[in-house]
Image: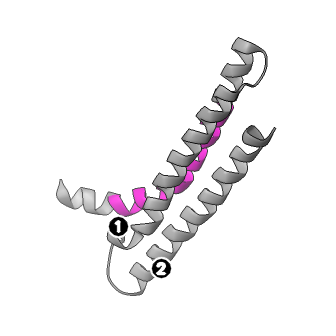
Amino acid sequence: MRAQDDKLTPWVAMLGPPTLWFVHFGFVYASASLEMVFTERATLLSRLVIAGGTLLFLAVIGWLGWKAPRFAPVAGKVREFWIGVTRITAAVSAIAVVYQAMPALLV
């Protein structure tokens, strides 16, 4: 089973940040929607929940980007490419998470 894990871990590390970005979108949408359904307006509680969740998502995305060399599959140029792609997906996902949270926090 260990060989299977070694093949799966790099893919999880590379596709983790965009997946977290997707989950964050659903989290922000659900948090705002539930607050609107129950109180008919956005309150400080929903903004705090979204802010806290956003910080958590950013921390995990940043950790995956920072630990990219640990999860890279092989040595050589393929390893360098994999690390670069993982860090780029983490950076793009972090920017997108911040962009998604801004309307909920500012409006």
Q: Note whether 52 is above or below 67 in the view shown.
A: above
Q: Which residue is mark 1?
A: 71
Q: Note whether 34 is above or below 72 in the view shown.
A: above
Q: Secondary structure at mark 1?
A: helix
The amino acid type of the residue labelled 1 equals Phe
- Considering every residue shown, the one lying at the far right of the view is 107
Which range of residues does the magenta coloring cover?
Answer: 9-30
Q: Is residue 40 left or right of residue 50?
A: right
Residue 53 location in percent, x, y? Answer: 55, 40
Q: Secondary structure at mark 2?
A: helix
Looking at the image, which residue is at 46% across and 53% down? 60
The front one of 105 and 94 is 105
Looking at the image, which residue is at 59% across and 65% down? 91
The front one of 2 and 97 is 97
Query: What predominant SS class does the magenta segment belong to?
Result: helix
Residue 14 in view, yes or no:
no
Looking at the image, which residue is at 41% across and 69% down? 68
Residue 24 magenta: yes
Residue 105 location in percent, x, y? Answer: 73, 40
Residue 58 location in percent, x, y? Answer: 54, 53
Q: Where, by quadrant of the figure, is residue 40 drawn?
A: top right
Residue 66 location in percent, x, y? Answer: 44, 68
Tag in front: 2 or 1: 1
Q: Which mark is drawn over residue 81?
A: 2
Q: Note whether 94 is above or below 67 in the view shown.
A: above
- Considering every residue shown, the one lying at the far left of the view is 1
Q: Is residue 2 left or right of residue 35?
A: left
Q: Which mark is drawn over residue 104?
A: none
Q: Note whether 61 is above or below 53 in the view shown.
A: below
Q: Quadrant of the C terminus?
A: top right
